[in-house]
Amino acid sequence: MNDGSTTHQPLLSVRDLTKTFSVRHAGKTKTLRALDGVSLELHRGETLGLVGESGCGKSTLARTLLMLERPDSGSISFGGVDPHALSGKDLLDFRRRVQMVFQDPFASLNARMSAGAIISEPWRTHRSLYPSSRDRAARVRELLHLVGLRPSDAEKYPQEFSGGQRQRLGIARALALNPDLIVCDEPVSALDLSVQAQVLNLLNDLQQELGVAYLFISHDLSVVRHVADRVAVMYLGRVVEGGATEPTFDEPLHPYTSALMSAAPSLDRAGKREQIILEGEIPSPINPPSGCRFRTRCWRATEECATVTPPLVHDDAAPGHTAECFHPLQPAAAAAS
């Protein structure tokens, strides 16, 4: 994790991002609102944890930031430039600067390619980075060593590695193009607990050494607490709370965040929150509730929660800690939404 400094221009800035899909539902074509006004920032060398229940829009947001999906509206700024306005060499450079580590380390690797070939494959497109075969072979050995594998592992195939070693290989491939940002989509959820810790520590060490930023997507709150400088909590296509990790998790403003934290496993019985049982199912993004998206499951909801989108409130005790809520759990100052 970085030193917490956010004084410089963000590496990534997202404002009011929306993304919809046309889907067939009950024999009719309807609109699914996957992202509905998402805003967030990520600074260089920082880890932003993105959490929320399945279907909240985390993966759609990641795909949109990677330009695998085009947003309907809103803006994305990466290094001060809109990536969707780029073309040619500028677009190619953007794709070099943003890489991804996938959830399933085996499915994301080509079983017919050796580890060395997997790592060096991106250089076939970005030839200027390591133009000679000697340079490429040397860099492959460096990357394998960097992620805790042996140089001789370059000759092995994915099926010859353990799960944790495969994920290390996936990380080495992501680092091959010297990126500024790596999107980590549930990068340790498919691994054993002991191996999870090793991979998380590796990611932290690499960040300290290389200054790379991470967008870390996970449903495991204990993992996010361990790796993230800041956290954004998503619910039904919106970021409902965000801020530095400790105040957001320890003193949440939004009832949804509090419910998530109460359900997280903990060995600290004395400090364990009483579990909050949310009633009902998550509403469909095809027909989301009016006003506050969470109001149909919230024990603090009132009539005004159904009328308009809640205001953005700020935690006076923790600068940068905000939430969208009419009735925050902690004393907060409201701001215009």
Image (cartoon, grey):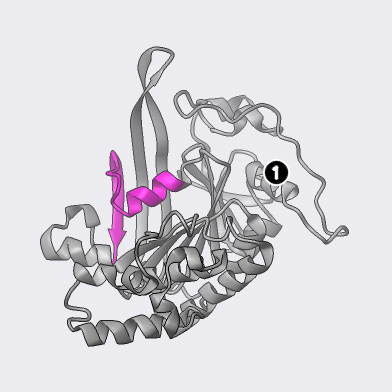
303 above or below 196? above
Q: Secondary structure at mark 1?
A: helix
| Identity, as a three-letter code, of the amino acid under mark 1 | Ala
Residue appearing at x 43%, y 73% in the figure: 156
Q: Which residue is mark 1?
A: 259
In this picture, which residue range is highlighted in magenta? Answer: 59-79
Q: Viewer-proximal residue, 326 or 41?
A: 41
256 above or below 45? above
Image position, residue 58 (x, y; %): 47, 47
Image quadrant for the C terminus? Answer: top left
Residue appearing at x 22%, y 79% in the figure: 129
Image position, residue 182 (x, y; %): 40, 65
Image quadrant for the N terminus? Answer: bottom right
Residue appearing at x 80%, y 51% in the figure: 273
Based on the picture, tell me whether residue 75 belongs to the magenta stretch.
yes
Based on the picture, tell me whether residue 150 belongs to the magenta stretch.
no
Can residue 9 be seen in the rendering of this structure?
Answer: no
Q: Viewer-proximal residue, 329 or 70?
A: 70
